Image: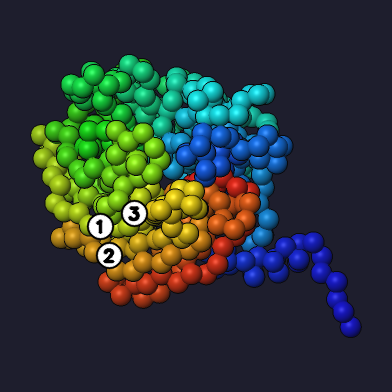
């Protein structure tokens, strides 16, 4: 006798066959930019106008195979860190670097600056109860404090690099409290915009009222204490900024907060073409030992680094702090006829020794993803999910899933397949 499966049973059956099966978490949230193609970085041409190509959140409730699609404006031109999810999994926070295109907009130079920060409900009707605030033009990244009650963001206007603190009450965003990095001692001497200062990412130190801000145009990271409350909130520099490798686009604190890792992409900002801008040398990760909480002088120091692969743009750290994944787009964004084009992207897995601060590459896996950026370990640290903006021979994007076998310096990546997505996926969070 044949038994017909109900819709719920079919969904559960499909999930058991999905690469997400066995993932330790409750939800997977990914963000997708519908306006850009991977090729847009080279030719400045946006994706063809199509209702199916929209900016959106994709939300998987683990146990079911199909995601919920929630429209929300965002841009891939920033670091992956434009997405955060509340600890209770009820809200996603998304910031846009560039605004959504209007009718007749076909090229990137014609896009208006973004500036909107959105709190998007993930339960109930996602179109209802959305809270938004403006951060001014070109915000780059956000990070949510561990208690879920404060967001930090960085942005760059033509004249200033800014840090914003945004109090959060559930899904309600308060007006930002804004600080000029120049007033905090982060200045430059060149004739370029903002004196060559560009802040690209910001991170809360776990368990502390401390922020790390990457200044990729000056190859340094700055640390600040967050003091006071309410309208009296203030930022105070904590020690001298620390020199890193070239182009520290993003980074991560280790879970215990003792170290900060910057992912040093290594681009050439003087180049006039995409091929010239992308590095020919391997990217690296710098390891900074953060001063202990009682060290008022802030005696942070860079204690080492490790090579990854070509054009590392994303980084993830396992919950126990022993594994680091670098996500490497290599030359997948170049036209196929380009001499330096590579068909595959890669993940490099590194082991981190928290006692010595030594970061050691231990494995590498290639996969057919174009322009991968974001990644996240699950709660167990035994699975890693990596975004691919596009798939090499298909129109959509993907979330590639890698298992972790072994432990310590014997840990290895095991390709467990991918989940198809619309094109444009560029960051992912697992809660």
SS at mark 3? loop
Query: Looking at the image, which residue is at 46% across and 36% down?
Result: 77
Q: Is residue 247 left or right of residue 53?
A: left
Q: Which residue occupies the foreground of this view, 31 or 120? A: 31
Q: Callout 3 environment at 10 Å: few (<14), some (14 to 19), or many (20+)?
A: many
Residue 218 placement: quadrant:
top left
Q: Is residue 133 left or right of residue 276?
A: right
Q: Residue 350, position in %: x, y?
A: 30, 63
Label 2 SS: strand
x, y percent for residue 247: 27, 40
Which of label 3 and label 2 is nearer to you? 3
Q: Is residue 310 above or below residue 222?
A: below
Asked if residue 340 is positioned above or below residue 129 in the image, the reply reads below
Q: Are marks 1 and 2 in contact (CB under 8 Å)?
A: yes
Residue bearing mark 2? 361
Image location (x, y in percent) of residue 268: 29, 39
- Decide if residue 194 is in sight here: yes
Q: Nearer the viewer, residue 341 or 292?
A: 341
Which residue bears the numbered disc 1?
Answer: 307
Q: Are marks 3 and 2 in contact (CB under 8 Å)?
A: no
Identity of the residue drawn at 27% across and 52% down: 281
Q: Quadrant of residue 219?
A: top left
- Between marks 3 and 1 in the image, the one whose residue lies nearer the viewer: 3
Where does label 3 land, which residue? 310
Outermost residue to the right: 1
Look at 38% across and 20% down and name the residue there: 157
Q: Residue at x 56, y 45 (%)?
A: 424
Instruction: Give the answer, above or below, for where 262 lies relative to 307.
Output: above
Q: Is residue 222 visible?
A: no
Cα separation between marks 3 and 2 = 14 Å
Residue 342 at x, y percent in the picture:
43, 57
Q: Residues within 10 Å of mark 2 (few under 14, many from 20)?
A: some
């Amino acid at each position: 006798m044949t038994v017909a499966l109900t819709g719920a049973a079919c969904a559960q059956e499909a999930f058991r066959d999905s690469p997400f099966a066995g993932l330790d978490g409750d939800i997977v949230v990914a963000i997708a930019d519908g306006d850009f193609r991977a090729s847009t970085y080279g030719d400045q041409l946006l994706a063809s106008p199509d209702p199916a190509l929209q900016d959106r959140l994709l939300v998987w409730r683990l146990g079911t195979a199909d995601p919920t699609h929630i429209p929300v404006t965002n841009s891939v031109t920033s670091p992956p860190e434009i997405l955060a999810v509340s600890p209770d999994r009820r809200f996603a926070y998304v910031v846009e670097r560039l605004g959504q295109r209007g009718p007749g907009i076909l090229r990137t130079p014609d896009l208006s600056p973004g500036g909107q920060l959105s709190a998007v409900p993930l339960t109930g009707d996602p179109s209802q109860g959305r809270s938004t605030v403006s951060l001014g033009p070109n915000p780059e990244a956000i990070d949510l404090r561990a208690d879920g009650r404060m967001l930090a963001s960085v942005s760059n206007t033509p004249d200033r690099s800014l840090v914003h603190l945004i109090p959060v009450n559930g899904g309600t965003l308060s007006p930002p409290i804004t600080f000029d990095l120049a007033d905090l001692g982060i200045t430059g001497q060149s004739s370029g915009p903002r004196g060559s200062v560009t802040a690209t990412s910001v991170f809360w130190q776990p368990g502390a009222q401390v922020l790390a801000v990457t200044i990729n145009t000056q190859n340094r990271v700055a640390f600040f204490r967050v003091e006071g409350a309410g309208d009296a909130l203030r930022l105070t520099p904590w020690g001298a900024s620390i020199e890193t490798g070239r182009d520290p686009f993003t980074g991560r604190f280790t879970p215990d907060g003792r170290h900060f890792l910057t992912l040093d992409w290594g681009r050439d900002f003087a180049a006039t073409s995409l091929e010239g801008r992308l590095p020919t040398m391997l990217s690296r990760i710098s390891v900074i030992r953060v001063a202990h909480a009682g060290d008022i002088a802030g005696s942070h120091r860079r204690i080492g680094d490790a090579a990854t692969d070509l054009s590392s743009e994303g980084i993830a750290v396992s919950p126990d702090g022993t594994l680091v994944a670098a996500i490497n787009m290599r030359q997948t964004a170049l036209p196929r006829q380009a001499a330096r084009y590579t068909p595959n992207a890669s993940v490099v897995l590194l082991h981190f020794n928290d006692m010595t601060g030594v970061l050691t590459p231990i494995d590498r896996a290639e996969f057919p993803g174009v322009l991968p950026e974001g990644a996240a370990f699950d709660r167990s640290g035994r699975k890693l999910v990596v975004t691919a903006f596009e798939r090499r021979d298909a129109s959509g994007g993907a979330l590639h899933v890698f298992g972790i076998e072994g432990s310590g310096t014997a840990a290895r990546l095991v390709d467990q397949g991918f989940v198809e997505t619309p094109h444009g996926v560029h960051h992912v969070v697992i809660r």
